[in-house]
Every structure is written in C-alpha cells, then in structure tokens.
Image: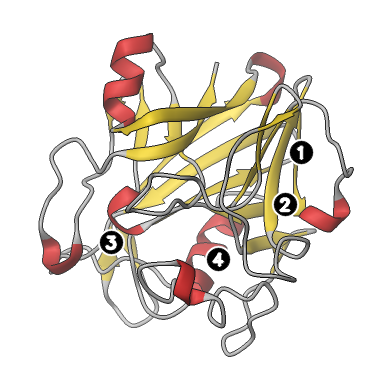
Amino acid sequence: MHFLPDGATTRVHATVHPLASIRPRVVRLDPPRRLLDFCTETGTQEAIVGGFFTRASGIPLGEIRSAGERLVGERWEEGLEAVRGCAHLHDGRVTLAARSELPAEPAGDLIQAGPMLVAEGRSLIDPGSDPEGFSSGSAQFDSDITAGRYPRAALGLTRDSLIAAVCDGRSWSDAGMTLEEMAELMLDLGARSALNLDGGGSTTLVSGGRLRNRPREEHGIELAGGRPITTAIAFE
C-alpha cells in the first residue's frame, strides 16, 4: 500500500527487468483484447499496457512502430506529435524521450504515449503546465488525463533496468494517483526517465503470467481481467 501526501492510499504494483537479460518489444493487439488474454495465448509472462487508443475504433493514438515499420495509428492534433513522449526500443537499448529527440525513421520498435514524467532524474510534471498538450488536446481522449487521480501506468528507465509500474484507483481504498504523484513514485523506484502510459480502465500489468493489479472502470466498477486494449509492451 502506497501512502499519498494527503493521507489517501493506493496499491502500487511494479516489476523490474534488467536490461541485460530482456528484449522489450511493442505489441499491436489486433483485434483489441485484454492483456492477460494475449499473455495467456502467447505464453508471455511479463507485459504492461502500451499507448492510448480510440475506444470506438480500437485504433492506436500517436505513432507506433514495429521492427522499423510504421503501423496504422490516428495522428495527434497538429503540432503535438513532436512534443509527446515515446519509448524507443531497439537492439536491447531503451530511450524514453520526446519524439523530436529521436530519429525521424527509427529502427526497432517505438510507441508514443505521454506525458513524460521524469527526465535526467527529476520530475517534469508542473501542475498548471501543459507542455505536451494533453489538457488542451483532451478532446481525443475520454477525459483530461492531467486532472485528478486515476489508475495509471508508467515505464521507467534506470541505468541498468526497466521498471513497469501501475497503481490501482477508483475505489475507497485505492485513490489512484495524479501525474505529479506518479512521477514521484517513479523517482522513488529509481527511474532516471519515465513515460506515462495508458491508464484508467486500461491500466494492466501482467507478471509471472498473472494480472497483478485490479482494473476498474469509472464509478469503481471492476473489470474482470481488464479492458481490451490495442498496444502493449512485452518484456521477453
């Protein structure tokens, strides 16, 4: 149980994957399905939800690449693609950074989410600031992901490992986290950089072949096994 600054609590689930022994990759789930179902079908033991998607169509939001090939995705509103955060996975190396800081045609896998939570060992979340346009561009989402506490997911990078972390929320015992609180959690876990992933009812973390968190829809409705999603990051 994780205690928040105002005394509220929320459960946190995290896995640490040494970079020397894994090859993380971006997975496109087409058609959309629950992360646990995908992991069971494929024998994948470790995975976390990936980027955002359009609920009605299941099309990923933002840029997504697999083995260097750009996959179909809905573009962000004009001017936002370059500033929004990405995870770039190639040949055992991982970079978490704004899209503009990465090659125009990167090799390997790439998934765009955001906002960036941590860079160079410090939090990037400044309440009231919206550098990646997630508040101003909230029309592409179900809600403004920058406002309030929600179940959240994040990917963090230390000097020698990847951290996959989620928090529960939307219940009397699990308050969820703000983006600022999620950034502080990733710093506490040792991340030098960290990227926010899809959250809310899509928040899912599988470890040891088991779903570790308790996904909930709005109003606290539990989602058995989680919500169908369209992208994930697998640690193999």
Q: Residue at x 44, y 23 (%)?
A: 46
Which mark is drawn over residue 192?
Answer: 2
- Residue at x-position 42% and y-position 80%: 147
Which element is circle 3 on? strand
Q: Which residue is mark 1?
A: 159
Residue hosting label 3: 10
With respect to residue 149, does 46 lie above or below? above
- Spatial CA span between label 3 and label 1: 27 Å
SS of the residue under disc 1: loop
Q: Label 4: how many residues lie within 10 Å, few (<14), some (14-19) or many (20+)?
A: some
Q: Position of residue 137 (x, y in %)?
A: 55, 76
Closer-to-camera residue (181/154)? 154
- Which mark sits nearer the N-terminus, 4 or 1? 1
Q: Residue 214: x percent and y percent?
A: 21, 46
Q: Which of the 4 image quarters holds residue 131?
A: bottom right
Name the quadrant containing residue 230: top left
> Where does the C terminus fall, quadrant-wise?
top right
Q: Which mark is residue 184?
A: 4
Label 3 Cα neighbours within 10 Å, binned few <14 / some 14-19 / many ≥20 = many
Amino acid at pointer 2: Arg
